[in-house]
Amino acid sequence: MQKALTFCSVAVVVAFALGIMLLHGSKVSTASAATVAQTEAVVPRCQQSRYGANGNMSPLFCIVDNPEALRYFSPMAKLTFALGPDATSSEVINALAGDYQHGGTGPILCSIYRLAAWRNHWAFGISIIDTLGERLNLPANWCAEPSFKGAT
């Protein structure tokens, strides 16, 4: 019974993947459909984006970073989003401070940092949030330090 259920589940995922690939005009082979079924089909769509009165938006993350959030914050995060995984804590702090000086707000800056930290897998020996908060005179607890379980 369990084998039959597993087989049916896999068949549905493969059929779904084939349908998506055919919709996009892709040439489909059984091997590529199985690969798609193992990767794309397990990633759920992001929730509907919500925009707050303070100019912030959410969700920032689904299973992966939300592409809509990246597009939304990109014009406000030019310096921060230009950094890569090898950025130093000083580079991150300077980039965030620069983005803040170009019209940012605390909630937006927090979202920008959390997105960039997630994308680049940043982990520093100091708190970027505390250091930046002191530098920009932001109120205590202006942003929660990001914690990404399972991110490597």
Image (spheres, helix red, strand yellow):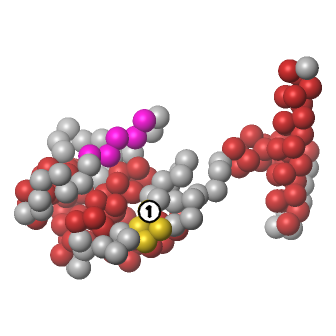
Q: Nearer the viewer, residue 78 or 107?
A: 107
| Residue 26 in the figure: left or right of residue 110 | right
| Residue 18 in the figure: left or right of residue 135 | right
Instruction: Identify the residue at the far front of this view.
Output: 53
Q: Nearer the viewer, residue 132 or 83?
A: 132
Q: Residue 146 in magenta?
A: yes
- Residue 2 visible in image: yes
Q: Give the residue pinned by disc 1.
A: 58
| Residue 97 in the figure: left or right of residue 47 | left
Residue 99's place in the image compared with 93, above or below, is below
Q: Which picture quadrant has residue 136?
A: bottom left
| Residue 83 in the figure: left or right of residue 105 | right
Q: Residue 82 in magenta?
A: no
**Rendered location of residue 125, percent (x, y):** 20, 38
Where does the magenta region start and end?
A: 145-149
Residue pictured at 82% horizontal, 44% vertical: 13
Residue pictured at 7% horizontal, 63% vertical: 137
Residue 18's place in the image compared with 35, above or below, is below
